[in-house]
Image (cartoon, helix red, strand yellow):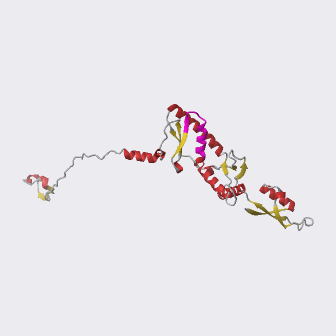
């Protein structure tokens, strides 16, 4: 992909040197046209800078860097820088983002960083023939993660050898699963294989020769628990609680109001049926 960049300096030679420094390309390898040769002026008056239009081809690494720098700027990480580091053991080009408070770019277990790396690879190979593999790291996170995974693999293999039982690790992406597999292969008496699919794919560390766990066991713990609980439900009880019968209790007749001068005059009056007793003095 051919791109253009306008560069200004006091002279054409200085503008070329400036462009080469910015692009990381030797000045004598640049293609350019002079838009304005500039003028020295007289006693500093009427002077103007030289202007050149530099043409350069954007390679895979340049495309990835440009994407990352634009992303960081738009995301509010304008102070962060993208630098090229030594190639990985697989010959992949490595880019590292350097700055402060970049934890959000890493995400949980590097999930956000993996997504960013995927997009950077799309940008790198959009206009280029063939395919270039780019790895993106933040604050040496991937190196630290590799150490953590290697330690996890060794500890798990030790537990398997002592207990004689297999252990299933948490879901991991393909890159992290490869690290576990590679580390365990160096330990005698244990082996590894993967179960599950998609985001739930996990590594199982098992004793050599032990029968593999079926993919059914690769379901998420919450899903397995739900199924287990459903199978353990007790059948409905056949015995019924004793039923309580409620009989209608008819309302008693309306209570009477009796006028008396004294209690002695109650006579046969039923006090229970009398709502109000008024003494008529």
Query: Which residue is situated farthest in the top direction here?
Result: 162
Q: Where residue 270 sits in the image (x, y, percent)?
A: 10, 53
At x 63%, y 42%, the residue is 146
Which residue is at the front of the view, 6 or 80? 6
On whether residue 275 falls in the magenta region, the answer is: no
At x 58%, y 36%, the residue is 154
Which residue is at the front of the view, 60 or 233? 60
Q: Where residue 175 sits in the image (x, y, percent)?
A: 60, 47
Above or below, 50 relative to 265: below
Q: Do we see residue 170 in this rendering? A: no
Q: Do we see residue 155 in this rendering? A: yes
- Quadrant including the C terminus: bottom left
Above or below, 2 relative to 96: below
Above or below, 87 relative to 153: below
Q: Across the whole image, how many numbered discs are drawn on residues?
A: 0
Query: Which residue is situated farthest in the left direction here?
Result: 268
Please identify the dominant SS of the magenta region.
Answer: helix
Magenta-highlighted residues = 175-191
**Residue 184 shown left or right of residue 36 in the figure:** left
Q: Quadrant of residue 76?
A: bottom right
Q: Where residue 69 sits in the image (x, y, percent)?
A: 69, 56
Query: Which residue is situated farthest in the right direction here?
Result: 42
Q: Quadrant of residue 192?
A: top right
At x 63%, y 56%, the residue is 119
Q: Where residue 50 sits in the image (x, y, percent)?
A: 85, 64
At x 61%, y 51%, the residue is 114
**Residue 69 shown left or right of residue 239 in the figure:** right
Q: Quadrant of residue 189?
A: top right
């Amino acid at each position: 992909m051919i791109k253009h960049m306008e560069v200004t300096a006091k002279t054409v030679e200085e503008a070329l040197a400036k462009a080469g420094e910015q692009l990381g390309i030797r000045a004598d390898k640049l293609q350019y046209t002079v838009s304005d040769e500039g003028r020295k002026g007289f006693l500093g008056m009427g002077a103007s800078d030289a202007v050149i239009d530099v043409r350069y081809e954007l390679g895979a690494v340049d495309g990835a860097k440009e994407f990352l720098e634009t992303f960081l700027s738009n995301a509010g990480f304008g102070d962060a820088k993208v630098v090229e580091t030594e190639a990985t053991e697989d010959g992949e080009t490595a880019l590292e983002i350097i700055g402060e408070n970049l934890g959000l770019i890493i995400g949980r277990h590097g999930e956000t960083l993996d997504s960013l790396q995927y997009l950077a690879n799309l940008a790198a190979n959009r206009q280029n023939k063939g395919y270039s593999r780019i790895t993106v790291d933040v604050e040496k996170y991937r190196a630290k993660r590799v150490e953590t995974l290697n330690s996890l693999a060794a500890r798990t293999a030790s537990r398997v050898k002592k207990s004689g039982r297999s252990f299933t690790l948490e879901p991991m992406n393909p890159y992290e699963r490869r690290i576990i597999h590679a580390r365990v292969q160096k330990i005698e008496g244990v082996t590894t294989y993967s179960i599950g699919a998609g985001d739930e794919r996990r590594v199982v560390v098992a004793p050599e020769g032990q029968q593999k766990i079926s993919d059914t066991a690769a379901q998420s713990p919450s899903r397995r628990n739900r199924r287990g609980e459903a199978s353990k439900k007790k059948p409905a009880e056949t015995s019924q609680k004793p039923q309580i019968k409620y009989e209608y209790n008819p309302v008693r007749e309306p209570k009477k109001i009796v006028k008396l001068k004294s209690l002695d005059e109650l006579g046969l009056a039923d006090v229970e049926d009398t709502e109000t007793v008024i003494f008529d003095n």
